[in-house]
Amino acid sequence: MAVKFIQEALKAPGALRATAKRLGVLKEGETLSATDLDELEARARKTGNKKLLRRVLFARTLKKVRKYNVKENSFFV
């Protein structure tokens, strides 16, 4: 496993947020919430947009990783 696998996995940082703003899910200055991700996932599945679906699922994965790191390694926070 690469040391910086997350940096290498992020092909287009900010693309999910830009798509959410363009679709009207997200307003200026807001953060992506779980309900926003649910709505984006539903739209991606409905339209067959595989790239958007991949980005939503990856965002959820990163959220889980961050939660795990904070819980286990609280001295890094």
Image (tube, grey):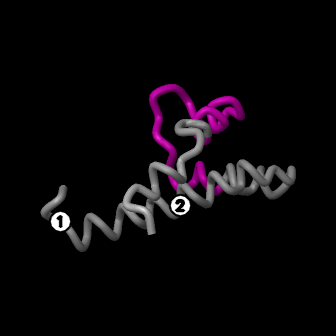
- Give the label on residue 2, or none: none
Task: Residue 69: name its quadrant.
Answer: bottom left
Task: Mark 1 or mark 2: name the one nearer the start of the chain.
Answer: 2
Q: Position of residue 5 (x, y in %)?
A: 46, 58
Label 2: which secondary element: helix
- For the C terminus, give its image quadrant: bottom left
Q: Is residue 49 magenta?
A: no
Amino acid beneath label 1? Ser
Q: Is residue 71 above or below residue 47?
A: below
Q: Indicate left or right for 15 with 33 as reference.
A: right
Magenta stretch bounds:
16-38
Question: Where does label 1 land, which residue?
Answer: 74
Q: Position of residue 70 (x, y in %)?
A: 26, 64
Question: Where does label 2 land, which residue?
Answer: 60
- Looking at this view, is 10 or 41 the one in front? 10
Label 1: which secondary element: helix
Q: Position of residue 38 (x, y in %)?
A: 64, 57
Q: Residue at x 59, y 49 (%)?
A: 36
